[in-house]
């Protein structure tokens, strides 16, 4: 750029490492490599057939081609469907009008909630490594980011009790997100009970990002923060997405539930920026939430098979990895003989030498150094091939 400068807050954003990985991927492809992309968490399986069919039907209806308005018929029904899904899934009762807000993907809501609430000297607490928009939303809103380190030793769970008192006094928002991207750590309901007890009486918005609620294995059931004791006494909200459970990432569909005052301010912020979700998409979303759910079970079963195949494969080639209880990721410490490399350098070698794209740990903040993340978003035969190729790189090093 010439002398025209971006806003300072934009300059404070970290480099988006997926862009660098994309460039490396294109370079490898240009050299004729058949690249296997396990970098981004973009699900490869199809959206539910009944949702796609409803979208096609509703797209023809002229009424649905207009701006979405908050008081419209489908807007009301979509919120009711979300409340119904919440009750079915978690046994939590929500007021569809006051405690539910649809989003154009949960990322959109996560970014805008920071914009709605943060002043320049307000702090946002983000456990790190983290899904980037938890941190970036705070920076883009002009707030101050304070990372709470997640380590293998603390089970990748944050301890907010260790945050200095002067930081807490200026904190207005914080994030938790379990099952966790990128570390795959999980929690039980006691985690949220403790969090709600700690947050009680504090003027802090507690955001739970439950993107992977349904991608769970081996009998584990991911709890919702909204099930916690005392959650109604705190400024608690929870974000959800259709991207993972229903393979609807490109549709840009999510929602947030929880404290009515927080949702009202978020809706107000959004009303200055967007016009809501295409109505045909909302009709289809109702079908996804309330229609047959075997598509979710099939998706999870496929991820379980991929997880087993890939983890067993990595262990066979000498890369010791445990099977995660949830998400479609693997968070792997860089093998000892490569430990002199940064996660970006190691990830670059995997693209260049194995033709396998992974996410470098520092794509999730500095606390991700020393790790890479695999997203199991390719069919089983491609995953087998990826393990074989990685095995060769590990063997010759
Ligand atoms: C933890 C987490 N939250 C939110 C999202 C974004 O979801 P959406 O597609 O609804 O914006 C992702 C996507 O990878 C995620 O991993």
Image (cartoon, grey):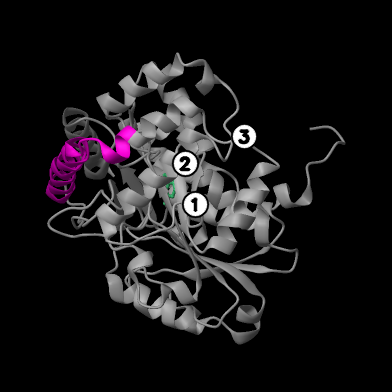
Residue linked to disc 2: 76
The magenta region covers: 287-316
C-alpha distance separating marks 2 and 1: 8 Å
Residue that extends furthest to the right in the rendered view of this protein:
3
Q: Position of residue 223 (x, y in %)?
A: 29, 63
Which residue corresponds to mark 1? 97
Label 3 with label 2: CB-CB less than 8 Å: no
Q: Quadrant of the C terminus?
A: top left
The Cα atoms of the two marked residues, 3 and 1, are separated by: 18 Å
Asked whether residue 158 is drawn in magenta, I would say no
Look at the image and tell me in which quarter the N terminus lies: top right
State the separation of the CA atoms marked 3 and 2. 15 Å
Q: Residue at x 56, y 43 (%)?
A: 16
In this rendering, does residue 40 appear at all? yes
For ligand 1, tell me if the residue under mark 1 lies within 8 Å: no
Mark nearer the viewer, 3 or 2:
2
Q: Is residue 315 above or below residue 357?
A: below
Q: Nearer the viewer, residue 315 or 56?
A: 56
Q: Look at mark 3 in the image and give the residue it sits on.
A: 275
Instruction: Specify whether 222 is left or right of 134.
Output: left
């Amino acid at each position: 750029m010439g002398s025209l400068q971006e806003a300072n807050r934009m300059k404070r954003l970290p480099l988006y490492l997926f862009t660098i990985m994309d460039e490396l991927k294109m370079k490898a492809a240009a050299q004729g490599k058949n690249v296997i992309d396990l970098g981004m968490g973009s699900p490869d399986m199809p959206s539910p057939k009944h949702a796609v069919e409803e979208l096609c039907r509703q797209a023809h209806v002229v009424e649905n081609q207009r701006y979405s308005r908050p008081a419209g018929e489908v807007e009301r029904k979509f919120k009711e469907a979300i409340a119904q899904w919440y009750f079915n899934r978690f046994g939590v009762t929500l007021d569809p009008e006051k405690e539910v807000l649809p989003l154009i993907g949960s990322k959109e809501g996560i970014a805008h909630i920071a914009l709605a609430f943060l002043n320049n000297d307000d702090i946002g607490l983000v456990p790190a490594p983290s899904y980037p928009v938890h941190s970036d939303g705070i920076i883009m809103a002009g707030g101050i980011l304070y990372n709470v380190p997640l380590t293998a030793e603390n089970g990748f769970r944050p301890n907010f009790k260790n945050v200095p008192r002067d930081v807490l006094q200026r904190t207005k928002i914080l994030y938790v997100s379990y099952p966790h991207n990128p570390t795959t750590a999980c929690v039980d309901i006691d985690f949220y009970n403790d969090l709600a007890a700690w947050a009680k009486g504090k003027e802090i918005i507690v955001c739970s990002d439950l993107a992977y609620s349904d991608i769970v294995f081996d009998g584990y059931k991911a709890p919702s923060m909204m099930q916690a004791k005392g959650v109604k006494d705190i400024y608690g909200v929870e974000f959800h997405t259709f991207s993972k459970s229903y393979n609807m990432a490109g549709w840009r569909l999510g929602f947030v539930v929880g404290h009515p005052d927080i949702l009202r301010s978020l809706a107000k912020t959004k009303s200055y920026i967007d016009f809501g979700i295409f109505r045909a998409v909302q009709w289809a979303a109702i079908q996804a939430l309330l229609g047959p759910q075997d598509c979710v079970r099939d998706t999870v079963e496929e991820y379980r098979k991929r997880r087993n195949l890939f983890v067993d494969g990595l262990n066979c080639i000498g890369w010791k990895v445990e099977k995660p209880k949830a998400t479609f990721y693997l968070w792997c410490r860089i093998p000892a003989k490569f430990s002199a490399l940064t996660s970006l350098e190691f990830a670059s070698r995997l693209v260049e030498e194995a033709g396998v794209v992974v996410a470098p740990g520092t794509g999730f903040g500095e606390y991700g150094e020393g790790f890479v993340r695999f997203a199991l978003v390719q069919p089983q035969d491609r995953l087998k091939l990826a393990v074989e190729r990685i095995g060769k790189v590990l063997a010759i090093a």
